[in-house]
Image (cartoon, rainbow, N blue to C red):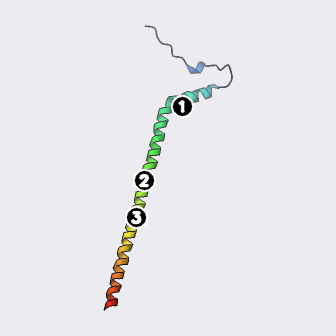
């Protein structure tokens, strides 16, 4: 069985002059790692979305607790005042 010859991009010579070897190597690296870069981007977006939702839930919970606490304070105070006024 004959060996497959591995073509090297290091031997590439651009006849049109549009690409340098550096640009070719950067493009090759990007294509090779594109899937990993995509997964990292999706993970970062997911983390950002989850942290935003968690922050919103916490702030909304604090707001609800503050309102319930204020209502019980207001209702408790008004009940005490009405007891004093009726005597």
Report helix, strand or loop for mark 1: helix
Q: Quadrant of residue 18?
A: top right
Question: x%, y% of residue 75?
Answer: 35, 77
Classify 10 Å Cα crowding around label 3: few (below 14), some (14-19), many (20 and above): few
- For image coordinates 57% across by 29% down, the residue present is 27
Quarter that holds the N terminus: top left
| Left or right of residue 26: residue 48 | left
Question: x%, y% of residue 28?
Answer: 55, 27
- The mark found on residue 60 in the picture is none
Which residue is situated farthest in the bottom direction here?
A: 87
Classify 10 Å Cα crowding around label 2: few (below 14), some (14-19), many (20 and above): few
Q: CA distance from mark 3 to mark 1?
A: 46 Å
Q: Nearer the viewer, mark 2 or mark 1?
A: 2
- The mark found on residue 30 in the picture is 1
- The mark found on residue 53 in the picture is 2
- For image coordinates 43% across by 56% down, the residue present is 55
Q: CA distance from mark 2 to mark 1?
A: 33 Å
Quarter that holds the C terminus: bottom left
41 vs 11: above or below: below
Mark 3 or mark 1: whose residue is earlier in sequence: 1
Mark 2 or mark 3: whose residue is earlier in sequence: 2
Q: Nearer the viewer, mark 3 or mark 1?
A: 3
78 vs 10: above or below: below
Report helix, strand or loop for mark 3: helix
- For image coordinates 48% across by 12% down, the residue present is 4
Classify 10 Å Cα crowding around label 1: few (below 14), some (14-19), many (20 and above): few
- For image coordinates 45% across by 49% down, the residue present is 49
Q: State the residue in front, 86 or 84.
A: 86
Report helix, strand or loop for mark 2: helix
Mark 2 or mark 1: whose residue is earlier in sequence: 1
Give the labeled residue for mark 3. Answer: 62
């Amino acid at each position: 069985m004959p060996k497959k010859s591995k073509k090297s991009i290091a031997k590439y010579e651009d006849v049109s002059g549009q690409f340098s070897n550096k640009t070719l190597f950067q493009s090759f690296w990007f294509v090779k790692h594109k899937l990993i870069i995509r997964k990292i981007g999706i993970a970062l977006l997911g983390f950002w979305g989850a942290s935003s939702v968690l922050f919103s839930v916490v702030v909304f919970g604090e707001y609800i607790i503050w309102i319930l606490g204020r209502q019980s304070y207001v209702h408790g105070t008004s009940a005490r005042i009405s007891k004093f006024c009726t005597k």
